[in-house]
Image (tube, rainbow, N blue to C red):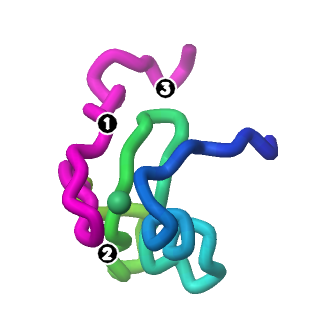
Amino acid sequence: MTAEARHCCDLMRLYVEHEDRVMLYWPRFDEYLIPVHDGGTSGIVLRYCPWCGVRLPKSKRDSDSPDA
Ligand SMILES: [Zn+2]
């Protein structure tokens, strides 16, 4: 499970890979999320990079079965 995701910029990569998990990246859905610290795993899905402004990949959440 060491697949490297291609992130849009160095800042995104920095935060996604940072231990404090400022930002989450879910390769499964190709989603970037800001974690919501409510004790669960929910987060706010980002559509644009907050740093470089690039449009992020469209989520695959709707087209991917969790049990597949
Ligand atoms: Zn970026």
Residue 19 locus on image (x, y percent): 65, 81
Tell me the magenta residue range.
Answer: 46-68
Q: CA distance from mark 1 to mark 3?
A: 19 Å
Q: Secondary structure at mark 3?
A: loop
Q: Which residue is mark 3?
A: 66
Mark with earlier residue (2, 3): 2
Q: Is residue 26 magenta?
A: no
Residue 5 locus on image (x, y percent): 60, 44
Ligand 1 shows up in the quarter that is bottom left
Residue 41 locus on image (x, y percent): 43, 63
Q: Amino acid at mark 3?
A: Pro
Q: Is mark 1 within 8 Å of ligand 1?
A: no
Mark 1 neighbour class, 10 Å CA radius: few under 14, some 14 to 19, many 20 or more: some
**Left or right: 48 in relation to 67:** left
Q: Which residue is mark 1?
A: 57
Q: CA distance from mark 2 to mark 3?
A: 21 Å
Q: Nearer the viewer, residue 66 or 5?
A: 5
The circle on residue 43 is: none
Question: For the image shown, how many numbered marks are present on the structure?
Answer: 3
The N terminus: image quadrant: top right
Residue plotted at (35% across, 27% down): 60
Residue plotted at (28% across, 71% down): 51
Q: Secondary structure at mark 2?
A: loop
Choose top left, top right, bottom left or bottom right for residue 40: bottom left
Hey, which residue is sitting farthest right in the picture?
2
Q: Nearer the viewer, residue 52 or 35?
A: 52
Q: Which residue is mark 2?
A: 36
Mark with earlier residue (1, 3): 1
Mark with earlier residue (2, 1): 2
